C-alpha cells in the first residue's frame, strides 16, 4: 500500500511521502488550532509544516512543483502561515492590542521586502547569463566579474521566507509568557535580517558585477575562433541525461591531430561533461551559431541524430560525418536520417552490412570503417574468472520511444534474470547497471527497475550475514577500510581539482576560469582510474551491487565481470571486445533462429527466453572452459563488428579524419576557383 502511494505521488522514499502528508495535513491543523484557539497545537502543527516543507525542498521533491502549479507555491504557504498567526492573535484576544497591529505591520513590511529581493536575484541571474558557455577557451578580454557567493544565490526564496520563523517563534512565546517584548524582538530580527539580505545582494546588481553585453561576448568568441582556427569539431545536442553520448568521445577527440573542438547546443549538458582539455563551446541560440565563423572547420562529427543538427549541416565548407554513440543492431543504427551526412562511420564490416540490408539511402561508398577507439580500455578475457565465484553483469537497455517488447528485457524478463542469478545453485555475484534513460518514458519500466533494485539490495543484505562469507569478510576488513579511506582521499582531491578552491561559481565564472590544463586533466584521469579500482576493493568480491550514475563507468564493469546479460544495444557490441561469454534476451520472442538472423551481435551469444531458463549455459561457459562452445564464434564476431586490432582504432579514426579533411579542402578550393576567388586555408 505504501509503495503504491509512493508511485502515485511520484516520491522516491517513505520519508518523502511522510513529509508530503505532513504538509497536506499540517495547514488544516494550523487553521483549526487558530480557530479553537490552542497555542500548543498551533505551534506543533506550524513546526511540522516548516520541517516537512524544508525537507521536500532539500530532496527536490516532484510534489513541490505540483504545489506551485495548483496555487500553493512556496510564498503562498508562508503567507498562509503568517495570516493564520494573525488569526490566532485575534482569537486569543489580542485583536485590539498593540501586539496585533505591530505584528500585522511587520509581516506586511516583510512581505514587501520580498519583492526587491526576488527582483535583484532575478536580475543577477539574467544579467550573468552569457549567450554562450565555454570550457578551455580564453575569455579574459570580456572581463567577467566573480559570481555572487552561493549562500546568497542558492535557493534565495526559501532563505528569505524562512526568516519569518523568528517572528513566528517570538509571537508564540510572547502569547505564552505574556512578555510582548519577545514578539517585538522576533519581528524586528526578521525585518533586520531581510534588509541585510537585500544589502548583501545590492553590490552584485552594479553594472561592473554583471557580465558584459551579448555583442562583446560573441565578439570575444569570434576572436578566439579566428586565432584557434579549429579543424575538426564534435557537434552534440541532447538532454542532460544524454551527456554520456558526448562523454564517450572526449578522449578520442583529445587524441586527434589538428585542432579539435566540441560544440554543444544545450547549457545543461556542460556541467555533465567529463574532464577534457579540448575547447568546448556551447551555443544555445541558433542565430548565434549561424553567425559564428566556422570556416576553418573541415570535419564535423555528429554523435546523435537530432533536429538541431540542421543548424550546422547547412554549412557547406565542412564535411559532415555521423559517428553515433554506439554500434548495435537497434533500428536507430540504420536511421534514414543518416543519409544527410557526407559519410557514416561504423566500427566494422557489420555496420556497413546493416545499412545495405536496411536500404535506407545510405550509399556503400559513403560508409567508412574506423573501429571503436573507446574500447581500448576494455581488458581481454584470460579464460578464467577474476574471483573464486563468477561475476555476472546485467546491463539492460532502456524501454525506448515505443512499446516494442524487443526494446528491453526489463519488462518481461528482467526480474526472472535477476532472480535466477541470485538463486543460482553455484554462487554468483550480480552487478546491475541499468541504462541512464530507464524509466524516463515508461512508468512500468521504472517500477520493474525499482523492484529489481530492491531484490538485489535484499540479497546483498542476506549475503552480508551469511556464515559462508564471514571468513572472507573478516579477512578483507583491513583492505576494505584502506580502500574506503583511499576513496575519501581521491574524492576530496577530485572535488578540489574540479572546484579550483571555490564552490560559489556560476556559469559565467566557470566559462571565464575553466581553461585547458593538461596536467590537471592527466591527474583527474589518473584519480578516476584509482577511484574505480578502490571502489571495487571497498566491497567484497561476493557482494551484489546496483551501479547507477556516471561515476562507475560501464567499461570498468566489463573489466570486473566474467560474463554479461544484456539486450540488443551497443553495450553488447562493446562487450564483445572483451571476448567474454555473454547472453542476450529475445524479449520479443522471435525464436532463437530468427533472433540470430535479425541481430548480428547475438551470433555468438547465449540466447535467453523471457523465462531466462537458459542462464545455466552462460554460467557453465564461465566456470568450465570445455563448456564454452561459443569462444571461437566470439573471436570471429569481434573482428566483424569492431574491425581489426591493427592498426589501432584511434589510428584508423585519425586517418579517416585527415582523409576527409583533405576532401573538404579540395572541395573548397574547387568552389573558390569556379567563383574566381583566391584559394584560402
Image (cartoon, rainbow, N blue to C red):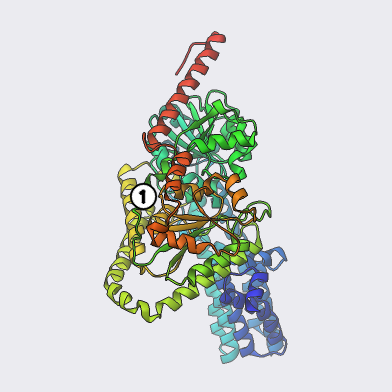
Q: Quadrant of the N terminus?
A: bottom right
Quarter where residue 70 is shown: bottom right
In front of the other: 317 or 265: 317
Given the current orientation, which residue lies at the most extreme top position? 676
How dense is the environment of label 1, judged by Cα within 10 Å: few (below 14), some, or many (20 and up)?
some
In front of the other: 7 or 278: 7
Q: Which residue is mark 1?
A: 380
Q: Identify the residue at image location x=34%, y=58%.
A: 384
Q: Identify the residue at image location x=57%, y=45%.
A: 329
Q: Is residue 396 above or below residue 231?
A: below
Q: Is residue 306 visible?
A: yes
Quarter where residue 27 is shown: bottom right
Q: Is residue 499 above or below residue 339?
A: below
In front of the other: 612 or 328: 612
Q: Position of residue 344 (x, y in %)?
A: 54, 32
Q: Position of residue 215 (x, y in %)?
A: 54, 34
Quarter where residue 620 is shown: bottom left
Q: Identify the residue at image location x=60%, y=33%.
A: 356
Q: How many marks?
A: 1
Q: Position of residue 111 (x, y in %)?
A: 63, 67
Q: Quadrant of the C terminus?
A: top left
Q: Identify the residue at image location x=50%, y=24%.
A: 295
Amino acid at each position: 500500500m505504501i509503495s503504491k502511494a509512493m508511485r502515485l505521488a511520484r516520491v522516491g522514499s517513505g520519508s518523502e511521502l511522510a513529509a508530503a502528508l505532513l504538509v497536506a495535513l499540517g495547514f488544516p491543523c494550523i487553521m483549526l488550532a487558530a480557530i479553537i484557539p490552542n497555542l500548543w497545537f498551533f505551534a506543533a502543527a506550524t513546526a511540522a509544516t516548516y520541517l516537512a516543507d524544508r525537507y521536500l525542498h532539500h530532496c527536490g521533491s516532484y510534489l513541490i512543483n505540483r504545489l506551485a502549479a495548483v496555487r500553493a507555491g512556496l510564498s503562498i504557504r508562508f503567507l498562509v502561515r503568517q495570516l493564520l498567526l494573525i488569526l490566532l492573535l485575534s482569537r486569543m484576544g489580542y485583536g485590539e492590542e498593540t501586539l496585533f497591529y505591530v505584528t500585522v505591520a511587520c509581516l506586511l513590511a516583510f512581505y514587501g521586502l520580498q519583492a526587491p529581493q526576488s527582483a535583484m536575484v532575478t536580475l543577477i541571474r539574467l544579467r550573468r547569463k552569457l549567450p554562450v558557455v565555454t570550457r578551455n577557451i580564453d575569455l579574459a578580454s570580456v572581463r567577467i566579474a566573480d559570481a555572487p557567493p552561493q549562500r546568497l544565490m542558492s535557493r534565495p526564496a526559501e532563505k528569505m521566507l524562512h526568516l519569518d520563523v523568528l517572528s513566528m517563534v517570538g509571537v508564540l512565546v510572547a502569547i505564552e509568557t505574556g512578555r510582548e517584548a519577545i514578539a517585538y524582538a522576533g519581528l524586528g530580527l526578521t525585518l533586520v535580517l531581510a534588509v541585510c539580505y537585500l544589502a548583501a545582494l545590492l553590490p552584485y546588481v552594479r553594472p561592473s558585477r554583471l557580465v558584459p553585453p551579448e555583442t562583446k561576448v560573441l565578439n570575444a568568441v569570434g576572436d578566439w575562433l579566428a586565432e584557434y582556427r579549429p579543424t575538426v569539431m564534435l557537434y552534440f545536442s541532447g538532454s542532460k541525461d544524454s551527456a554520456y553520448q558526448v562523454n564517450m568521445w572526449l578522449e578520442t577527440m583529445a587524441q586527434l591531430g589538428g585542432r579539435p573542438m566540441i560544440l554543444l547546443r544545450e547549457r545543461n549538458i556542460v556541467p555533465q561533461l567529463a574532464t577534457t582539455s579540448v575547447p568546448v563551446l556551447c551555443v544555445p541560440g541558433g542565430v548565434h551559431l549561424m553567425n559564428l565563423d566556422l570556416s576553418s572547420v573541415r570535419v564535423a562529427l555528429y554523435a546523435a541524430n537530432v533536429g538541431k543538427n540542421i543548424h550546422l549541416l547547412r554549412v557547406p565548407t565542412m564535411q559532415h560525418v555521423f559517428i553515433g554513440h554506439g554500434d548495435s543492431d537497434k533500428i536507430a543504427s540504420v536511421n534514414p536520417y543518416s543519409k544527410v551526412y557526407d559519410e557514416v562511420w561504423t566500427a566494422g564490416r557489420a555496420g556497413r552490412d546493416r545499412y545495405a540490408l536496411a536500404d535506407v539511402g545510405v550509399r556503400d561508398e559513403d560508409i567508412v570503417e574506423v573501429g571503436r577507439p573507446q574500447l581500448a580500455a576494455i581488458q581481454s578475457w584470460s579464460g578464467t574468472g577474476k574471483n573464486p565465484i563468477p561475476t555476472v553483469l546485467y546491463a539492460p537497455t532502456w524501454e525506448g520511444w515505443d512499446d516494442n517488447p524487443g526494446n528491453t528485457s526489463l519488462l518481461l524478463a528482467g526480474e526472472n534474470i535477476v532472480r535466477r542469478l541470485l538463486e543460482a545453485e553455484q554462487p554468483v555475484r550480480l552487478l546491475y547497471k541499468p541504462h541512464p534513460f530507464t524509466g524516463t518514458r515508461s512508468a512500468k519500466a521504472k517500477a520493474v527497475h525499482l523492484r529489481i533494485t530492491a531484490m538485489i539490495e535484499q540479497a546483498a543484505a542476506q549475503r552480508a550475514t551469511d556464515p559462508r562469507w564471514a571468513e572472507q569478510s573478516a579477512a578483507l576488513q583491513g583492505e576494505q577500510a584502506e580502500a574506503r579511506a583511499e576513496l575519501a582521499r581521491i574524492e576530496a582531491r577530485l572535488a578540489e581539482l574540479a572546484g579550483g578552491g571555490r564552490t560559489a561559481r556560476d556559469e559565467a565564472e566557470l566559462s571565464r576560469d575553466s581553461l585547458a590544463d593538461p596536467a590537471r586533466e592527466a591527474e583527474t584521469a589518473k584519480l578516476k582510474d584509482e577511484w574505480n579500482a578502490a571502489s571495487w576493493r571497498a566491497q567484497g568480491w561476493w557482494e551484489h551491487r546496483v551501479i547507477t550514475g556516471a561515476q562507475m563507468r560501464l567499461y570498468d564493469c566489463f573489466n570486473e565481470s566474467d560474463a554479461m546479460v544484456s539486450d540488443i544495444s551497443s553495450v553488447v557490441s562493446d562487450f564483445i571486445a572483451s571476448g567474454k561469454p555473454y547472453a542476450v534476451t529475445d524479449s520479443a520472442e522471435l525464436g532463437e533462429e530468427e533472433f540470430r538472423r535479425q541481430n548480428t551481435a547475438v551470433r555468438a551469444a547465449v540466447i535467453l527466453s523471457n523465462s531466462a531458463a537458459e542462464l545455466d549455459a552462460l554460467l557453465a561457459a564461465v566456470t568450465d572452459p570445455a563448456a564454452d562452445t561459443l569462444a571461437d564464434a566470439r573471436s570471429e564476431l569481434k573482428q566483424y563488428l569492431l574491425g581489426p586490432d591493427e592498426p589501432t582504432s584511434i589510428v584508423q579514426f585519425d586517418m579517416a579524419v585527415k582523409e576527409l579533411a583533405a576532401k573538404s579542402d579540395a572541395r573548397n578550393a574547387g568552389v573558390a576557383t569556379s567563383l574566381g576567388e583566391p584559394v584560402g586555408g
